[in-house]
Image (spheres, helix red, strand yellow):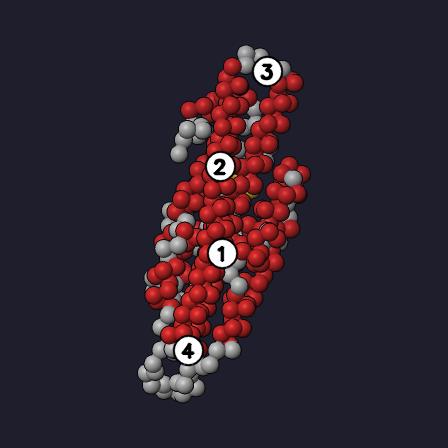
Amino acid sequence: MKFGKEFKTHLEDTIPEWRDKFLSYKPLKKLLKNLPPSSSSDLQFPHPQPPPPPPLEAWFVRILNDELDKFNDFYVDKEEDFVIRFQELKERIQRLKEKSSQSERYTSDYEDEFSEEMMGIRKDLVTIHGEMVLLKNYSSLNFAGLIKILKKYDKRTGGVLRVPFTQLVLRQPVFTTEPLTRLVHECEENLERLFPLQEEVIQSNPVPENKSRPIEDNTTNDLPDASSTLGDETVYIYRSTLAAMKAIKGLQKESSTSNPFSFSSLFTNQDADSTGAVTAENSAANSPATLHNEESTVKGPDSS
C-alpha cells in the first residue's frame, strides 16, 4: 500500500481529537504538484541543475517549520500529561499497598473494595499505556511523512533540502522519544508485576516477525473479555494502538533505504531496547495478600 493511503488509514483509525495534529500530508503533496518542475526532471540523463530560487525554498521551509511547531506543541503537552497521570497512578498503587499491609483482617467488604480499586488502577494503566504507545507512533508516522515530502520536494525542484532539514528535524522534541520510551517501559513493568497471568498484548514497538507473533487483521474486532472489564473508552484506545502498530509495521517493511535518515534506521535506533507490553485480565494478583507480597517489587511514587 502506498504511504499516502497508509497514512490516511491510520488517521481514520486514530483518536479523533488527534487527527488534526498529524502532518498535513495530502495538502503538502498537492502543493508540491503545483510547484514549477526542475528543467531536468523530464530528461532521461539529467545534467546538474542549480537549486530552486531562495524565495521558493524559504517559503517551503516556513511551511515545514509550522508543521514542526504543531508536532512539538502537541507532543510536549501530551508527554507532560502522561508524566503527571502516571505519577498519580504510582501513588494510588502505593497507597493501596500500604492500606493492605495495615489491614489485619480481610472482610468480604474489604475484598470487594480492594478488587474494585485494583481494577480501576488496571484500567487506567492500560489506557495510559495505549496512549503513550500511540504518541510514539505519532512521532514515527510524522517523521516518515516528512521524509516523503522532502524527497518529493527535491525531486520536483532539483533542490537538496532533504538532508539538512532532516538533521534539523531529528533535534526536535517530537522526534526525541527516549524519555517517552522509558515511561512506557516503566508502565509495562508495573502492569506485569500487578497483573502477571493473562495477557492483552500491545507491543510498544513492532519487532521482526520471527521474534513476535504477527498482529492479525481481526485483532481489533475480537476483544470480548477486555471490553467487559476495561470499558469502551479503554478498548477504543486499545484498538487505535493496534491499528497504529500495523501502520508502523507496514512502513518498516516498505522502507528499503539504509541511510541514517531513513524511517527504519531512526525507528530501530530509538527503540532497540524496547519490549512488549503485557496487561492482564482478572487474576489471582487482584487480592490484598498478593499486592502486599509485591511490596518489594512494585514501583512506588518515588521511583523514576
Disc 3 versus disc 4: nearer the observer? 4
Which residue is tagged 1? 70
Left or right: where does residue 233 sit relative to residue 213? right
Which residue is tagged 3? 106
Q: Looking at the image, is 168 positioned above or below residue 59?
A: above
Disc 2 versus disc 3: nearer the observer? 2
Q: Residues within 10 Å of mark 3 (few under 14, many from 20)?
A: some
Helix, strand or loop at label 2? It is helix
Q: Nearer the viewer, residue 221 or 142?
A: 142
Left or right: where does residue 95 sit relative to residue 17? left
Q: Residues within 10 Å of mark 4 (few under 14, many from 20)?
A: many
Helix, strand or loop at label 3? It is loop
Gap between marks 2 and 1 measured at Cα: 22 Å
Is residue 258 shown to the viewer in this render? no
At label 1, which amino acid type do we have?
A: Lys
Gap between marks 4 and 1 measured at Cα: 25 Å
Helix, strand or loop at label 4? It is helix
What's the residue at 42%, 45% (across, down)?
181
At label 3, which amino acid type do we have?
A: Tyr
Disc 4 versus disc 1: nearer the observer? 1
Q: Nearer the viewer, residue 153 or 273?
A: 153
Which numbered disc flags the more N-terminal residue, 4 or 1? 1
At label 4, which amino acid type do we have?
A: Thr
Disc 2 versus disc 1: nearer the observer? 1
Q: Which mark is residue 84?
A: 2
